[in-house]
Image: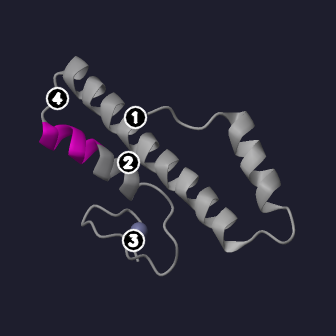
């Protein structure tokens, strides 16, 4: 499933900026965005698995890399990042 193009996203932004959208239109737009979200996750899974195979990593190793990357991000306060490697130092 292809993800939305920049033109399609711009068209959605334009539609959302239009006054008087009714519930059916909003439902349709939400459906488009949710489908795009699913497609983005599928793409991300595909590339993650490709990277894992090329690097010869186990699932545990790539999961640990992602956990460390997420832990090193700035977290909203108070930090509730659900991982023991969080680097916020609350
Ligand atoms: Zn944190």
The residue that label 3 is drawn on is 89
Ligand 1 within 8 A of label 4's CB? no
| Image position, residue 56 (x, y; %) | 16, 22
Q: What is the magenta range? A: 59-65
| Image position, residue 81 (x, y; %) | 36, 70
Mark 4 or 2, nearer chain start = 4
Magenta stretch encompasses residue 84: no
Mark 3 or 4, nearer chain start = 4
Q: Do the residues bearing badges 1 and 2 touch, measured as CB atoms within 8 Å?
A: no
The residue that label 2 is drawn on is 69
- The image quadrant of residue 6 is top right
Residue sitting at x 37%, y 58%: 71
Q: CA distance from mark 4 to mark 1?
A: 19 Å
The residue that label 4 is drawn on is 57
Ligand 1 within 8 A of label 1's CB? no
The circle on residue 43 is: 1
Label 3 Cα crowd, 10 Å radius (few <14 / some 14-19 / many 20+): few
Q: Helix, strand, or loop for circle 3?
A: loop
Q: CA distance from mark 1 to mark 3?
A: 33 Å
Q: Helix, strand, or loop for circle 4?
A: loop
Q: CA distance from mark 3 to mark 4?
A: 29 Å
Q: CA distance from mark 2 to mark 3?
A: 16 Å
Count of marks overlaid on the render = 4
| Image position, residue 10 (x, y; %) | 77, 44
Residue sitting at x 44%, y 33%: 1
Label 1 Cα crowd, 10 Å radius (few <14 / some 14-19 / many 20+): some
Ligand 1 within 8 A of label 3's CB? no
């Amino acid at each position: 499933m292809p993800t939305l193009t920049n033109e399609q996203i711009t068209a959605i932004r334009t539609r959302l900026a239009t006054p008087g959208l009714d519930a059916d239109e909003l439902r349709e737009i939400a459906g488009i965005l949710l489908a795009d979200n699913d497609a983005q996750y599928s793409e991300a899974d595909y590339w993650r698995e490709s990277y894992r195979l090329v690097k010869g990593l186990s699932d545990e190793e790539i999961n640990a890399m992602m956990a460390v990357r997420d832990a090193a991000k700035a977290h909203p306060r108070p930090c509730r990042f659900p991982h023991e490697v969080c680097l916020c130092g609350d």
